[in-house]
Amino acid sequence: MQFLLVEYVMTPNDIMSIVLGTLGAVAIILLIVFLVYLIKTMKSVSKIVDDVSEPVGEVADALPGLIEPAQILVDGLADTVPVILDDVSIMTGEITEAIDSAKSFFENRSRRQSARQSDNIGTQAARMLGFLAGIVAALKQAKSKKKKKK
């Protein structure tokens, strides 16, 4: 019986070739798996896009018809909002004046409690009617300004 004895010494280059070959094979297998999943995902995305493309097309076709009325509305608001704000500021000023008048009336009234007894009812009624007439005149003036602006 004879035995053949062979000594083989592995160099670092041989070890590196085996490791890199194994890692390369694993990387190629993982890349193939990744590409399979990517293809499945792209098919799903394609189906979703096909399902949604028709309704999106309808909405896109309807947009020009919606933009024109919206533009008319915005233009109308641009014209009327300043007028409304002017009317509100006029009314605010008139209401402030009316409140100030009422405040001064009641302050004067409380100060002159003793003098009030000497005043007759006709004078007090005339003052009240004058106050109310001033408020009505202010409101009519605001309405006439609003009509003139239109």
Image (cartoon, grey):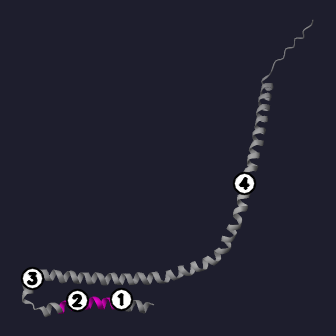
Q: Would residue 93 appear left or right of 118 to someone viewing this image?
A: right
- Quadrant in the picture for residue 26: top right
Q: Please tell me whether mark 2 sits on a helix, a strand or a loop.
A: helix
Q: Residue at x 77, y 24 (%)?
A: 12
What residue is disc 1 on? 142
Q: Would residue 116 appear left or right of 129 to someone viewing this image?
A: left
Q: Residue at x 39, y 84 (%)?
A: 87
- Mark 4 or 2: in front is 4
- Residue 23 versus residue 71 in the image, above or below: above
* Count of numbered badges drawn on the protein: 4
Mark 1 residue type: Ala
> Rounded to the nearest whole Å, what is the CA distance between mark 4 and mark 3?
89 Å
The mark that comes first in sequence, 4 or 3, is 4
Mark 2 Cα-neighbour bin, 10 Å: few <14, some 14–19, many ≥20: some
What residue is disc 3 on? 113
Q: Which stretch appears magenta?
A: 126-142
Coordinates of residue 68 in the picture (x, y in percent): 61, 80
Q: Does the magenta stretch include residue 133?
A: yes
Q: Would residue 61 appear left or right of 11 to someone viewing this image?
A: left
> Rounded to the nearest whole Å, what is the CA distance between mark 1 and mark 3?
35 Å
What residue is disc 2 on? 131
- Quadrant in the picture for residue 32: top right
What residue is disc 4 on? 44
- Mark 4 or 1: in front is 4
Q: Please tell me whether mark 4 sits on a helix, a strand or a loop.
A: helix
The mark that comes first in sequence, 1 or 3, is 3
Q: Would residue 17 appear left or right of 68 to someone viewing this image?
A: right
Q: Residue at x 87, y 13 (%)?
A: 6
